């Protein structure tokens, strides 16, 4: 069974930085595109970013482009999201999910999410 | 990229059918069969219910079905059950090689 476990969330001041991690198990992590998707409190889902299996291709939502960086370490079965210049509107539960990219069509496994709160 | 448009809520009695619409544009839903649907009960992570417009992953009841016409995709839940009460979101691949989600629909079982 595929399992994804996020960590690294917490309280950060506006303008600050935070790095999220996602540990994968139960499948060949390196075979798949991976994505980050977020959900602000009481709001809907918003796709944030994806990265190809070999890290050769990434893409970002306009709302985070230039501030967030997605990366992965296939040897550690891990996905990361470096978040810089954080804003109040980045407050959300951040989910990692398997899938994304031009060769996929959906997100078939999700983690339980990690909460990021941006507030002074 | 604007969110896909879904009705805020739909409701039905047990055993009835409900349909949720998901309206996009010719840059997303209308151009790709990469539409998927997710179920999210309160306080839990989303779960994939339908992918590529009408395909069900293993383990998803056949009461759930999907379709698409033009820029609008639809999810139908037949034989509504109490356990189906949740928020539902559609998603589509876009011409910018990104993904967009719908605004979400709360399904209430009366």
Image (cartoon, coloured by chain):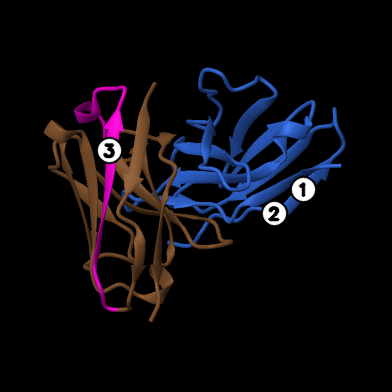
Chain colours: A brown, B blue
| Residue at mark 3 to residue at mark 2: CA–CA distance | 35 Å
Determine whether, in the image, residue B84 is placed left or right of residue A59.
right
Give the position of the C terminus of chain A as an image quadrant.
Answer: bottom left
Q: Confirm or deny contact between disc 2 and disc 1 (CB under 8 A).
A: yes
Residues indicated by labels 3 and 1 sit on the same polypeptide chain: no
Which residues make up the magenta segment?
A15-33
Numbered tag placed on residue A23 in the rendering: 3
Relative height, residue B8 to residue A102 (above, below): below
Tell me if I can see residue B63 in this picture.
Answer: yes
**Few, some or many C-alpha atoms within 10 Å of disc 1 (few <14, some 14-19, many ≥20)?**
few
Helix, strand or loop at disc 2?
loop
Residue at image point 42% right, 72% down: A89
**Which residue is label 1 attached to?**
B10
Residue at image point 67% right, 43% down: B86
Q: Which image quadrant is residue B103 in? A: bottom right
Helix, strand or loop at disc 3?
strand
Inspect the magenta stretch and tell me whether residue A4 lies in it.
no
**Which residue is label 2 attached to?**
B7
Q: Where is residue B65 in the image (x, y as percent from the top left)?
A: 64, 27
| Residue at mark 3 to residue at mark 1: CA–CA distance | 36 Å
Inspect the magenta stretch and tell me whether residue A21 lies in it.
yes
């Amino acid at each position: 069974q595929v399992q994804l476990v996020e960590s690294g969330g917490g309280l950060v001041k506006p303008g600050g930085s935070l790095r999220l991690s996602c540990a994968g198990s139960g499948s060949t992590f390196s075979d798949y595109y991976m994505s980050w998707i977020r959900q602000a409190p009481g709001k809907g889902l918003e796709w944030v970013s994806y990265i190809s299996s070999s890290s050769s291709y990434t893409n970002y939502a306009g709302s985070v482009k230039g501030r967030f960086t997605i990366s992965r370490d296939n040897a550690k079965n891990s996905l990361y999201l470096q978040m810089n210049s954080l804003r109040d509107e980045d407050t959300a539960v951040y989910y990692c999910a398997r899938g994304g990219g031009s060769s996929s069509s959906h997100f078939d496994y999700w983690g339980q999410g990690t909460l990021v709160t941006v507030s002074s | 990229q604007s969110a896909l448009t879904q009705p805020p809520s739909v409701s039905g009695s047990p055993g009835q059918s409900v349909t949720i619409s998901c309206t996009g544009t010719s840059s997303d839903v209308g151009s790709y069969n990469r539409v998927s649907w997710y179920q999210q009960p309160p306080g839990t992570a989303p779960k994939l219910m339908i992918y590529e417009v009408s395909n069900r992953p293993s383990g998803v009841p056949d009461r759930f079905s999907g379709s698409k016409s033009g820029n609008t995709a639809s999810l139908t839940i037949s034989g509504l059950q109490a356990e189906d009460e949740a928020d539902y979101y559609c998603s589509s691949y876009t011409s910018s090689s990104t993904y967009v989600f719908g605004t979400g629909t709360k399904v209430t079982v009366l």
